[in-house]
Image: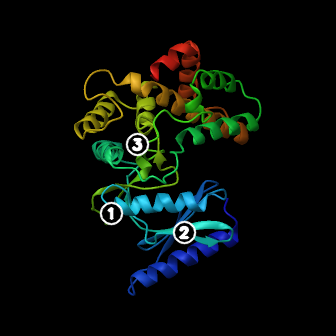
């Protein structure tokens, strides 16, 4: 949980900025997220985000600048630089309407895929740091090891060992020129202007250069694990290809490009699930068990084969 002084200061920051933007502010505040990797508070049409304590200010500025340069792809911040607040870096954003989690049939898979394709085709600034997807996956494994023993940990760790070094954040990525989001899921899309504007990508914390297939890996992994219906995966992949996305071939089998990132996201998801279950002292639920079982199947595939799929 976020310390009370920081949460209060963040709420005050959002309110004062909202009132500056609109003298007739209808008011009304809410905490949208309160996690170790970020606290997000909304006041009317303004959102304030406290970034993780270890955020590099220079890298964050480069990421904010990139979002500002691509307002038709990424939600642009209200200010180009972060502000310090209680030893955290804080950024301000316009509010956008998120995807409705209670209406899965309305999930904007085509919009997500099209935005990704446009992002991957956009020129990446020279100073932009590496996309942080593999780093986040590696941190999930650290959390798993620190959480304590659990029967499901073994297959997750075995599956992790089959991945090439770059996917474990132990070596540079094979692509260092493509602009990537780094943490794509449906929670990273909002409509702006709210409530019915075009869809835009949010959350620049992991934005950077790297392997674009990583941005397709979460839906690919869900599909491979049976958690995403085939028609929704097809919609997503077809829209990405139609928009000229470079992560997969325009035709034919996409899995040689997707295999390693999809495996990595499966392991990351399973590691987080097991770690949370250990901390909470509860059994794995059905979805969590399915990703662990996927890791068990992955671990049975020779490591060399997994590496060949990445080439």
Q: CA distance from mark 2 to mark 3?
A: 25 Å
Q: CA distance from mark 2 to mark 1?
A: 21 Å
Image coordinates of residue 41 in percent, x first then y, are 53, 67
Q: Quadrant of the C terminus?
A: top left
> Pointer 1: residues within 10 angstroms few (<14), some, or many (20+)?
some
**Mark 1 secondary-structure assignment:** loop
Quadrant hosting residue 242 = top left
Q: CA distance from mark 3 to mark 1?
A: 25 Å
**Mark 3 secondary-structure assignment:** loop
Image coordinates of residue 284 in percent, x first then y, are 62, 32
What residue do we see at 36% from left, 34% from top? Answer: 247
Is 201 left, or right, of 206 in this rendering? left
**Mark 2 secondary-structure assignment:** loop
Mark nearer the N terminus (3 vs 1): 3
Quadrant hosting residue 193 = bottom left
> Pointer 3: residues within 10 angstroms few (<14), some, or many (20+)?
many
Image coordinates of residue 149 in percent, x first then y, are 76, 29
For disc 3, the marked residue is 178
For disc 1, the marked residue is 192
- The answer to whether mark 3 and mark 1 are in CB contact below 8 A is no
Question: In this orientation, does residue 285 appear?
Answer: no
Nearest the viewer among 210 and 233 is 210
Mark nearer the N terminus (2 vs 3): 2
What residue do we see at 57% from left, 74% from top? Answer: 11
Furthest toward the left, the residue is: 242
Residue 96's disc number: none
For disc 2, the marked residue is 82
Question: In this orientation, does residue 280 appear?
Answer: yes
Image coordinates of residue 237 in percent, x first then y, are 30, 33
């Amino acid at each position: 949980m976020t310390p009370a002084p920081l949460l209060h200061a963040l709420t005050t920051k959002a309110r004062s900025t909202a009132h500056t933007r609109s003298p007739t502010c209808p008011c009304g505040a809410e905490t949208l997220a309160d996690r170790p990797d970020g606290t997000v508070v909304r006041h009317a049409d303004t959102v304030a985000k406290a970034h993780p304590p270890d955020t590099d200010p220079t890298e964050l500025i480069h990421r904010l600048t990139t979002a500002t340069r691509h307002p038709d792809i990424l939600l642009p911040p209200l200010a180009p630089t972060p502000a310090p607040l209680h030893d955290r870096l804080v950024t301000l954003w316009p509010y956008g309407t998120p995807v409705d989690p209670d209406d899965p049939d309305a999930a904007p898979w085509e919009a997500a895929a099209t935005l990704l394709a446009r992002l991957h085709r956009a020129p990446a600034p020279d100073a932009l740091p590496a996309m942080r997807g593999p780093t986040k996956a590696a941190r999930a494994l650290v959390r798993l090891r620190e959480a304590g023993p659990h029967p499901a940990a073994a297959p997750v760790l075995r599956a992790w060992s089959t991945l090439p070094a770059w996917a474990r954040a132990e070596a540079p990525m094979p692509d260092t020129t493509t602009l990537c989001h780094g943490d794509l899921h449906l929670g990273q899309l909002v409509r702006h202007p709210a409530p019915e504007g075009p869809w835009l990508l949010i959350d620049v914390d992991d934005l950077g250069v790297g392997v674009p297939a990583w941005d397709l890996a979460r839906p690919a992994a869900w599909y491979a694990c049976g958690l995403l219906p085939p028609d929704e995966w097809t919609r997503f992949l077809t829209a990405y290809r139609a928009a000229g996305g470079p992560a997969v071939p325009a035709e034919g089998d996409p899995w040689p490009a997707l295999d390693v990132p999809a495996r990595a996201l499966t392991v990351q998801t399973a590691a987080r699930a097991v770690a949370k279950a250990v901390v909470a002292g509860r059994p794995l639920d059905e979805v969590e068990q399915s990703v662990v079982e996927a890791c068990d199947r992955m671990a049975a595939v020779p490591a060399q084969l997994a590496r060949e799929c990445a080439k």
